[in-house]
Image (cartoon, rainbow, N blue to C red):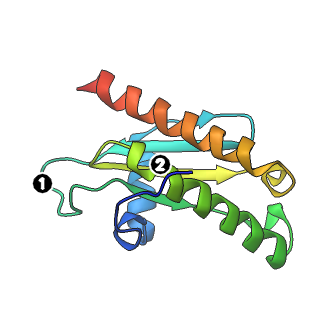
Amino acid sequence: MREATFDWRGARLRKHADYQRVYRASRRYTSASMSYFYRVRGEGEAAGEQARIGLTTGRVLGKAVERNRIRRRMREAMRLHLGDLPGKVDVVLHPRRVVLEMEFRRLESEVAGIFAGVKSGVEAKR
């Protein structure tokens, strides 16, 4: 496995308004175990050059222990592939409950595929 070279703290969506901007400017995309949204930030936004990621885990995914486990698995898969995302893009991931039981390599390859799709989508818009 490769180590990513980036500041993970700066790579997170933190504010509700940031999530809402992504939802308004995007449409829902789906993969086998999650849905996702993405948006390219404009030139005037002061969020930096790095890609940012948001993760949502609602109560429908299970009790707190299960949701926290989903978050930990997703964060690790995202950390390994964040360098694959182009700069100035915001991504929001909505995992499904199946992420809890799936093999980590499969989860990691799915996240890598999603990031590759985001990258090709961003490049197509430029």
For image coordinates 69% across by 44% down, the residue present is 34
For image coordinates 67% across by 66% down, the residue present is 71
**Local secondary structure at mark 2:** helix
Q: Residue furthest left?
A: 44
> In terms of depth relative to the viewer, which is nearer, 106 or 29?
106
Q: Is residue 35 above or below residue 1?
A: above
Q: Is residue 93 left or right of residue 103?
A: left
Residue marked by disc 1:
44
Instruction: Return the x and y of residue 104 as percentages of the image width and height.
Output: 75, 51
- Label number found at residue 23: 2
Tell me which corner region of the image, top left, top right, bottom left or bottom right, holds residue 125. top left
Q: Is residue 88 left or right of residue 67?
A: left
For image coordinates 28% across by 47% down, the residue present is 87
Q: Amino acid at mark 2?
A: Tyr
Q: Is residue 4 above or below residue 108?
A: below
**Local secondary structure at mark 1:** loop
Q: Amino acid at mark 1?
A: Gly
